[in-house]
Amino acid sequence: MRLTTLSDYALRVLMYAAAAGDRLITIEETSRTYDISRAHLMKVVNILIRSGHLKGVRGRSGGFTLARSPERINIGDVIRVTEPDFALVECFATGNQCIVTGCCKLPSILNEALNSFVATLDRYTLADLLLRKSDFQAPRKIASRGTRGPALRAFR
């Protein structure tokens, strides 16, 4: 299973906003920091504002900040808001054409696994992911299972 880019970016935005404290941050600033598309971040931030995870301030001096304390932002809730569905296999989705749907045992096993996955995320809040402002300053290589992740840009 892989989370969508939308979920990935949502978690990154929330982590960055938490590190900024009460200071308003902008989409442009966040885009530069993570070196990701401003257009993608606009969509992510709008979803997080509509869901009550972020608070947006319009205007020339506008930006966004956390709408709640990090301890009150549940990771499972964020994923539920940002994932379009949890259809792991065809039979979970509408329009299922699988000929063994009525007798297949796979859906119950996958549902159990999915429920465990979401239950694990529900045990964590944004407070468990907090970083310091300095964690966003120096570009660095991030290794994960033999691959390099994106470099982070300066936190201003």
Image: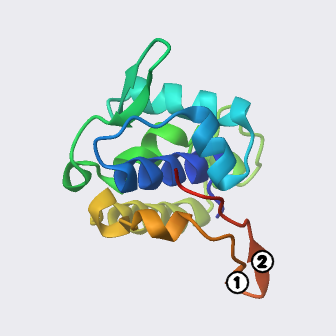
Amino acid beneath label 1? Ala
Q: Quick one: 73 or 25, which is closer to the camera?
A: 25
Q: Quick one: 71 or 132, which is closer to the camera?
A: 132
Residue 142: percent from the left, percent from the top? Answer: 68, 78
Image mark count: 2
What residue is disc 2 on?
148
Quarter of image, res 105: bottom right
Residue 149: percent from the left, percent from the top? Answer: 73, 71
Q: Are marks 1 and 2 in contact (CB under 8 Å)?
A: yes
**Left-right relation of 141 to 3:** right
Task: Assign a secondary structure to mark 2.
Answer: strand
Amino acid beneath label 2? Arg
Q: Quick one: 146 or 152, which is closer to the camera?
A: 152
Quarter of image, res 103: bottom right
Residue 95 seen in render: no
**Left-right relation of 15 to 106:** left
What residue is disc 1 on?
143
Task: Assign a secondary structure to mark 1.
Answer: strand
Residue pushed farthest top? 59
For residue 7, which numbered disc appears in the image? Answer: none
Residue lying at 61% horizontally and 28% vertically, measured from the top left:
43
Q: Where does the N terminus fall, quadrant-wise?
A: bottom right
